[in-house]
């Protein structure tokens, strides 16, 4: 899967979860969900950026 799609679907799902938690009044859990999403997306992006060029070419 292309990186931007992976990041989008990951963040979209987590934001949706956080919004549901907010609706339930669980603001601390919602905040944690958003921070986890941010950290997961950053880790995914950094990891993908560190892959060797040869590996990236095979994925295309």
Image (cartoon, rainbow, N blue to C red):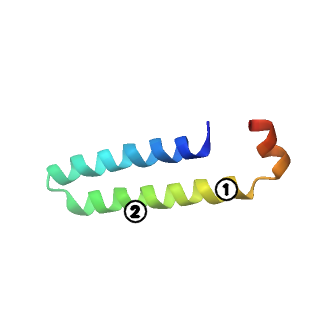
Q: Is residue 59 left or right of residue 38?
A: right
| Residues packed near mark 1 inside 10 Å, few (<14), some (14 to 19) or many (20 plus) | few
| Residues packed near mark 2 inside 10 Å, few (<14), some (14 to 19) or many (20 plus) | few
Q: Nearer the viewer, residue 24 or 44?
A: 44
Badge number at residue 47? 1
Q: Is residue 55 left or right of residue 40?
A: right
Quick one: quadrant of the C terminus? top right
Please tell me whether residue 33 is drawn above or below residue 10 in the rendered image: below
- Residue appearing at x 30%, y 45% in the figure: 16
- Residue appearing at x 28%, y 58% in the figure: 29
- Residue appearing at x 15%, y 50% in the figure: 23
Query: What element does badge 1 sit on?
Result: helix
Question: Of callouts 2 and 1, which one flags the residue occurring earlier in the amino acid sequence?
Answer: 2
Q: Looking at the rendering, which quadrant does residue 12 occupy? A: top left
Residue for badge 2: 35
Q: Is residue 55 left or right of residue 20?
A: right
x and y percentages locating residue 6 in the rendered image: 54, 42
Query: What element does badge 2 sit on?
Result: helix
The reply to whether dot 2 and dot 1 touch (C-beta < 8 Å) is no
x and y percentages locating residue 51 in the rendered image: 76, 53
Q: Nearer the viewer, residue 39 or 56?
A: 56
Quick one: quadrant of the N terminus? top right
Please tell me whether residue 1 is drawn above or below residue 42 in the rendered image: above
Q: Looking at the rendering, which quadrant does residue 26 occupy? A: bottom left
Q: How many marks?
A: 2
Q: Nearer the viewer, residue 19 or 25?
A: 19
- Residue appearing at x 43%, y 49% in the figure: 11
Q: Is residue 8 left or right of residue 56?
A: left
Q: How far is disc 2 from disc 1 in space, using C-alphas?
A: 18 Å
């Amino acid at each position: 899967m292309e990186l931007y799609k992976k990041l989008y679907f990951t963040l979209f799902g987590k934001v949706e979860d956080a919004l549901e938690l907010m609706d339930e009044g669980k603001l601390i859990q919602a905040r944690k969900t958003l921070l986890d999403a941010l950290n997961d997306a950053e880790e995914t992006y950094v990891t993908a950026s560190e892959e060797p060029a040869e590996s990236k070419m095979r994925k295309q």
